[in-house]
Amino acid sequence: MTRRPGTATAPRLYVLTPPVGEAAAVSGDLVGSLAEVLPGLGIAAVLLRLPDTDERTVINLVKGIAPGIQSAGTALLLDGRPDIVARAGADGAHLAGADALKAALPRLKPNHIAGAGRLPGRHDAMVVSEAGADYVMFGEPDAAGHGPAFEAVIDRIAWWAEVFEVPCVAYAAGLDEIAPLVAAGADFVAVGAALFDDPRGLKAAVADAAARLASPEPAA
């Protein structure tokens, strides 16, 4: 996941999965769904949300999912769990906050991606950037599902794009937010429930999201 400096290439999609169940059938369904949509769309990364269960079960789940995602040229990131990234065959981890990012860096660097989100202020974003984060994410909801106002996310992205070289991932709660986020300067756009809950199906939703990435609207 590298864009910037220059941002000459088009922004790319970053997919957040729903929580993955423990059963092999559940993970298999997820892999099958993603396998239909990943090839050809240039999706940068899939962030896998794992069950809160024993370590061996989680590692086996990731091992079963990783090849189907990585074969499409897409990075597989784990939501937290930097401790199992290498053993599970994932490409990196997404960490919540500066403290989690700093604690995870010795495990992840230099061979794996270390991304940071849940950054409440500009200072927090600068801290993780200076610490060595491979990207920062703005706008994602907290554990209770609450996120910042969309206007605040746009403002944060525009500021970051103007000043910093570390890539920026912008969280879109809905597909209609994608184009304005790109116009504001996002290098990647993260979309989760808006894709998986789309009544048209995942394939159509991802294709729609990809089209919106390619046609940004002027930022307000």
Image (cartoon, rainbow, N blue to C red):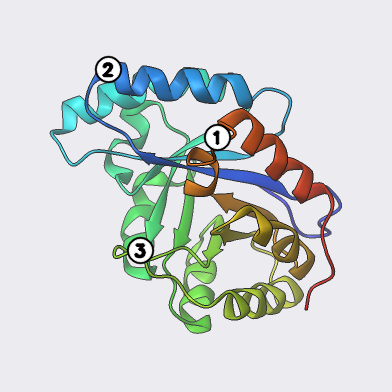
Q: Which residue is mark 2?
A: 24
Q: Residue at x 57, y 52 (%)?
A: 190
Amino acid type assigned to the residue bearing label 1 in the image: Ala
Give the residue at mark 1.
75
Q: What amino acid is labelled 2 in the image?
A: Ala
Q: Is residue 139 above or below residue 148?
A: above
Q: Residue at x 75, y 50 (%)?
A: 11
Q: Place residue 157 in its image quadrant.
A: bottom right
Badge 1 marks a residue whose secondary structure is strand
- The location of residue 103, given as percent across then percent down, is 31, 59
Q: Looking at the picture, does residue 210 appear above or below residue 125?
A: above
Identified at 54% across, 59% down, the residue is 173
The residue to which callout 3 is attached is 145
* 3D distance between C-alphas at marks 3 and 1: 25 Å
Q: Position of residue 93 (x, y in %)?
A: 41, 46
Q: Is residue 6 left or right of residue 21?
A: right
Disc 3 to disc 2, C-alpha distance: 27 Å
Left or right, 195 with respect to 177, comes to left
Residue 164 can be seen, yes or no? yes
The image position of residue 52, as x and y in percent, is 18, 42
Residue 157 vs residue 45: left or right?
right
Which corner quadrant holds the C terminus? bottom right
Labels 3 and 2: the sequence-earlier one: 2
Kind of element beneath mark 2:
helix
- Using a 10 Å C-alpha cutoff, classify the residue at mark 3 as few (fewer than 14 neighbours), some (14 to 19) or many (20 or more): few
Could you tell me if the residues under marks 3 and 1 are in contact, i.e. CB atoms within 8 Å?
no
